[in-house]
Amino acid sequence: MSSIQTYTQATPEAGLKRALGMSRPDIIHEMNESGLKGRGGAGFPVGGKWNFAASAKSEKKYIICNADEGEPGTFKDRVVLQEHADLVFEGMTIAAKAVGSREGILFLRGEYTDLREHLEDTLQRRREQKLLGDNIQGSGVDFDIRVFIGAGAYICGEETALIECLEGNRGEPRNRPPYPVNTGFNGHPSVVNNVESLASAACIMGRGADWWKTMGTAKSTGMKLFSISGDCARPGVYEFDLGVTVADILKEVGGEGAKAVQVGGASGRCIPPSEYARSIAYEDIPTGGGSLIVFGQQRDMLDVLENFMDFFGDESCGQCTPCRVGNLKLLEGVKLLRAGKCSMSYLKELCALGETMQIASKCGLGQSSPNAFLSVVAHFRDEIMGRTYSQA
Ligand SMILES: Cc1cc2nc3c(=O)[nH]c(=O)nc-3n(C[C@H](O)[C@H](O)[C@H](O)COP(=O)(O)O)c2cc1C
Ligand code: SF4
């Protein structure tokens, strides 16, 4: 039995069958009405993205499912692919009808190769059921999907680096604009959507935008999947309506009394107990990819930071200076703090560096990698500076 109720309750192929009988603008209108925002991190409206690709003129268009899921602390897409692969492929096929695409690609994280056989079997069964291939369900729509295995780099989850990788190049982010919806895979308009975005889109087409809006808040509609890990009694993948408070989540997972919660994975923000009454929603604490890492009272926040900054230093693609050098400087700063050798004025300089990285880095990796550092300095200053003075 799946832990994801909304997906388990979906009537198989109801969304696809409905979409096949609708016009492209009507499908996009339904997605816009639902208010569904991308679940991969950036929160861009799904209907808006489909509309851009639908409006682009090109003989070829691509639907790409981003199943790279490399953000530390994030593992919900893996569960969706394991338990609801049909819903993901259904969502891709609906997107294909909406934008006029004949080819889909599922970009699977290199570390998830064990899922490949299951995904290929599901695709084959869908072809036999005429849910993929030529003239799907007699609708005149032709669309098929292939699986591409990534090579295990975090940066390849960034949509333009992912496209570079698909093209056989080194996985490095491109300048934007142009955006993939205009110039994507092999120069053709491409929709890149997260696994959960596509599965949720299929549910919305099946049950309607109004149903989706009964969940969540006015600005953050629907339910969201959360990967919850760390110091809690019941880690795992959970489904909550957007707008849920951090405190409610902690209660559900047995993480009450936590010292801090990292919302949005390593690239998200670390929040202290004084903010647990806040809600996870685009208008309050952004979800990112929907990961919560719970830190118990025993955790040393410098251990947490060292771990994250070490990760970003390794995973930076090195193309731009703020990220390539900045992450290593912040890691060095954490080590200085640990050794009691970081003065208050140098800490200020490190924070200014972090803010510069947020503004000046070329892609989301460098723009978000200082978040944890800056939020730990803001909320746990006594803990990290205490060491500075006691050991100086
Ligand atoms: C460093 C980095 C890694 C990313 N990794 C992923 C990922 O693993 N999966 C994902 O869906 N989006 C990831 N993204 C976001 C994608 O670039 C893109 O915004 C997303 O796939 C769009 O899908 P959505 O609109 O459905 O959320 C990443 C972004 C960055 C900057
Ligand atoms: S921000 Fe980092 S990962 Fe992104 S392009 Fe620059 S160096 Fe590469």
Image (cartoon, rainbow, N blue to C red):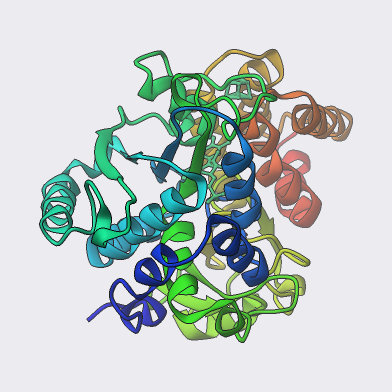
Q: Please name the residue shown 64% across and 74% down the image.
A: 221
Q: Is residue 299 left or right of residue 363?
A: left
Front residue (pair 335, 195): 195
- The quadrant of the rendering that contains the N terminus is bottom left
108, above or below 195, in the image: above
Spot occupied by residue 74 in the image (x, y as percentages of width and height) = 44, 54
Q: Is residue 216 left or right of residue 315?
A: right
Front residue (pair 383, 262): 262
- The quadrant of the rendering that contains the C terminus is top right
221, above or below 89, in the image: below
Q: Is residue 105 left or right of residue 358?
A: left
- State the image quarter where residue 186 is shown: top left
Q: Please name the residue shown 69% across and 70% down the image.
A: 220
Spot occupied by residue 311 in the image (x, y as percentages of width and height) = 49, 33
Q: Is residue 339 left or right of residue 277?
A: left
Quarter of the displayed picture in which ligand 2 can be seen:
top right
Res 56 visible: yes
